[in-house]
Amino acid sequence: MASFRLVPCKLRDGWLVPRKDGEALALSWPELCARMAPSGSLLAKQNLRKAAAPNTYVILVRQPSGGISNVLVRNADMTGDIRALVQRDPTFAGRVVEAFRFEQVSWDDAVVEPGATR
């Protein structure tokens, strides 16, 4: 079964940094979708499927409509630098609900692609 290990992070001065008080999460694909794509939308699940890799960050953000969506960030230098994103949207930092860094990602053939049926 596909498994994912995520480290909780916090936003500090435009950087995502690991929380010292947070415990890593170990999730299966259905659990990952439930936790990191709370809207249940196809786009949110596709974001996870395409971008889930070690050193990628997933950020849950509250939308102006009240819903929560996910944003995935993977920097070439593998850091949690999102200063450019925060500068483009000054409200972004205040809308962050949770943030995590993928520490380990293990895929298998039992994962059903979002939007596909078996």
Image (spheres, grey):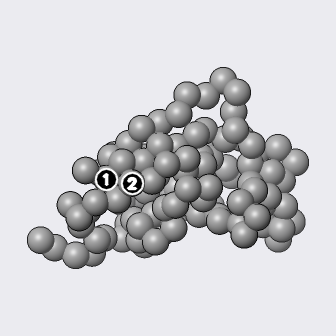
Q: Nearer the viewer, residue 87 or 53?
A: 53
Which residue corresponds to the image point at 47% horizontal and 36% vertical from the top-left?
A: 25
Which element is circle 2 on?
A: strand
Q: Nearer the viewer, residue 37 or 63?
A: 37
Q: Is residue 10 left or right of residue 27?
A: right
96 shown above or below 91: above
Q: Is residue 69 left or right of residue 21?
A: left
Measured in 3D between alpha carbons, the distance from the residue under mark 1 to the one under mark 2, in whole angstroms, is 5 Å
94 shown above or below 86: above
Mark earlier in primary sequence (1, 2)? 1
Quadrant of the image occupied by residue 37: bottom left
x then y, percent, for residue 6: 52, 43
Residue placed furthest toward the bottom: 116
Q: Mark 2 belongs to which amino acid?
A: Ser
Q: Nearer the viewer, residue 67 or 27?
A: 27
List the residue tagged with mark 1. Answer: 2
The reply to whether residue 92 is visible in this rendering is no
Q: Is residue 87 left or right of residue 71?
A: right
Q: Mark 1 belongs to which amino acid?
A: Ala
Residue 17's mark? none
Which residue corresponds to the image point at 55% horizontal and 47% vertical from the top-left?
A: 103
x then y, percent, for residue 69: 52, 60
x then y, percent, for residue 49: 41, 67
List the residue tagged with mark 2. Answer: 106
What quarter of the picture does the C terminus occupy?
bottom left
110 shown above or below 17: below
Which residue corresponds to the image point at 58% horizontal and 40% vertical from the top-left?
A: 7
Density class for disc 1 (Cα within 10 Å; few <14, some 14-19, many ≥20) is some
x then y, percent, for residue 40: 36, 60
Which residue corresponds to the image point at 83% horizontal and 53% vertical from the top-left?
A: 14
Q: Dots 1 and 2: beta carbons under 8 Å?
A: yes
